[in-house]
Amino acid sequence: MKQKVLLNIKSTHIVKGMAAEDMEYNVSGFYEFEDGMHKINYEEIADDKSSLIKNTFTFNDKSASLIRRGFVDSSMDFRPGEDMNPALYKTVYGDIDMGVRTYAVDICRNNDRITADIHYSLYTGEMLLSECKLVISIYNATFEI
């Protein structure tokens, strides 16, 4: 059964020699739990401010996946302990092959929320692009963020 939820999404990207880039936003979405997997569907406004990105975030205690569709399409799998997982970014300018190396997927549950905390690195070929952290907190729609 789908349930309306509120999401607080925080991400940090650190590129060597540059200041960390932090982003945080709140959106509403829909949550469901099926066959041992948590699934969140939500939309966000693209950087161009004129289009929507549709996101599907799925996770369990061991791994997570984020699929984004819109101005830029991407698919990333976060599986700690695996060497490198392919990630593809499809843009209007062409496709970019990337790699995701996941260090940790930590899931915390309490009475009012579920939090997924993911630490990973993005690569192109063997070149490190950025060290990243993604934290998605999922609240029942009756709670305030």
Image (tube, rainbow, N blue to C red):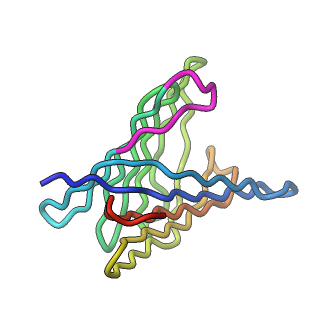
Q: Please give the name of the residue rendered at 39% of the width and 48% of the height, measured from the top-left corner.
A: 28
52 sits to left or right of 41 = right
Q: Is residue 48 above or below residue 132?
A: above
Q: Please give the name of the residue rendered at 31% of the width and 64% of the height, measured from the top-left corner.
A: 140
Image quadrant in which the N terminus is located: bottom left
76 sits to left or right of 62 = right
Picture quarter containing residue 13?
bottom right
Q: Please give the name of the residue rendered at 50% of the width and 66% of the height, measured from the top-left corner.
A: 118
77 sits to left or right of 111 = right
Instruction: Give the percent coordinates (x, y) of residue 75.
Output: 42, 42
Of all residues, the one furthest to the bottom in this rendering is 110
Nearer the observer, 85 or 141: 141
Picture quarter containing residue 3?
bottom left
Instruction: Give the percent coordinates (x, y) of residue 37.
Output: 22, 62
Instruction: Name the main secondary structure of what is drawn in magenta.
Output: loop
132 sits to left or right of 71 = right
Report the magenta residues as a range. Answer: 42-51
Instruction: Give the percent coordinates (x, y) of residue 9.
Output: 52, 57
Instruction: Give the percent coordinates (x, y) of residue 109.
Output: 34, 79
Q: Please give the name of the residue rendered at 31% of the width and 80% of the height, measured from the top-left corner.
A: 111
Magenta region includes residue 47: yes
Q: Is residue 56 above or below residue 20?
A: above
Nearer the observer, 105 or 88: 105
Picture quarter containing residue 114?
bottom left
Magenta region includes residue 7: no
